[in-house]
Amino acid sequence: MARKVFIAATGMNSGKTTTSLSLMHMAKKKYARVGFIKPIGPKPMQYEGVIADKDAVVMARYFNLVDDLPLMSPFVLQKGDTKRIMDGIINKDEIANKMLDAIAELDAKNDFLIIEGAGHTGVGTLFGCNNARIARETNATVLMVTGGGLGNVVDTAQTNLALFQKERAKVKAILVNKIIAEKRDQTLRYLQMAFAEEDIQVIGGFNYQPILANPTMRRIAAVLEAKMRATEEQQQRIVHNVQIGAASAPRVVELLEPSTLIIVNRSRDELLVTLSNLYQLDEYRHKIAGIIIPGIGEISHITEKIINSSGIPYIRAELTSSNVFEIIRDDVSKLTAEDTHKIRLVTDLAEKRFDFESIDALLD
């Protein structure tokens, strides 16, 4: 039987997957057999013939657990499933049994098992098996992951704790992510005071890291549903800044910050040529992540030749400049299995910042 930790969260985008990756990496240093499961999979994708949740695929591919993928993502929510469940076409008990059976099988074959919840605590209530119930049924210790701040952490954590308490699941600790570095000690001290009466331990997670929060070039091309011309290394480049190249070419260059993605209209030949030439210089290579050329018209032949010969990565998007900017701004970057640079950074940071021993001790 495995030591089981249930990764809950106060909501989306609080760092559950980053936490699971860190736990997996650190647990494998101590335990011979470490498993992962995401019982409710809200983000379906197909990998090697298996329909599974995207996060489960990331874990399976990076940690060489592909053979266990069907167990790691036993129930994937497809479009229309909510209505089918309510109409009785999909049986609630069968869903619950499928998830719990998969957890039991992984429990039996591992020394340490990470169970990652979906969204907030109540996700899954509609089909009778929310996060809190899964934690209780599997007798897993709950680690609740939150975003940063003080008041927001307390408020959202208390809201989610209520359902765990109702289900009699044991929440042992809150892991706080996205902490402002210079306020880390102060934030954790006040949060420990806030949860002292709950007998819940507060553990510091990752400081806020733009490099983790920001998207890769590959991610941007995917959300824009656009084609990209770039090497594998260039696709993994993390974009820290996005600039609309509306000013003069010298002014755009003056405004460049580290790892900037510039949106440039196809008619701006002088700017496209300038950026392409600058990309070949070491002093500018770190500032230019790439360019996006919006619209459906053709680029002039000579400009396209210069862009291609320069090696600058670029994306052609059949959207307006303003639409491109809004989509990128509104997107929340998610890890994919191809983001190996980011995943390696997460595991490297885990070595320095992640208090695995404190978490492991909670499972005794």
Image (cartoon, rainbow, N blue to C red):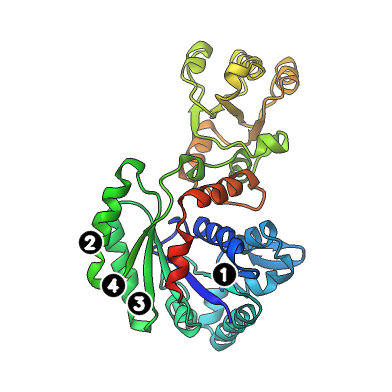
Which of pointers 4 and 2 lies earlier in the amino acid sequence?
2
Residue kind at label 1, given as amino acid type = Lys
Which of pointers 4 and 1 lies earlier in the amino acid sequence?
1
Look at 74% across and 69% down and name the residue there: 67
Instruction: Characterize the local packing of mark 1: few (<14), some (14-19) or many (20 or more) Cα atoms within 10 angstroms.
Output: many
Q: How many marks?
A: 4
Instruction: Characterize the local packing of mark 3: few (<14), some (14-19) or many (20 or more) Cα atoms within 10 angstroms.
Output: some
Instruction: Characterize the local packing of mark 2: few (<14), some (14-19) or many (20 or more) Cα atoms within 10 angstroms.
Output: few
The residue pinned by badge 3 equals 163
Residue kind at label 4, given as amino acid type = Asp
Percent position of residue 261, x then y: 55, 30
Instruction: Characterize the local packing of mark 4: few (<14), some (14-19) or many (20 or more) Cα atoms within 10 angstroms.
Output: few
Residue kind at label 2, given as amino acid type = Met
Label 4 element class: loop
Label 1 element class: loop
The residue pinned by badge 4 equals 199
Q: CA distance from mark 4 to mark 1?
A: 27 Å
The residue pinned by badge 1 equals 38
Report if the CB atoms under discs 2 and 1 are less than 8 Å apart: no
- On screen, 52 above or below 294? below
Percent position of residue 122, x then y: 41, 73
The residue pinned by badge 2 equals 193
Q: CA distance from mark 4 to mark 3?
A: 17 Å
Percent position of residue 240, x then y: 50, 34
Q: CA distance from mark 2 to mark 1?
A: 32 Å
Label 3 element class: helix
Which of pointers 3 and 1 lies earlier in the amino acid sequence?
1
Q: Nearer the viewer, residue 334 or 196?
A: 196
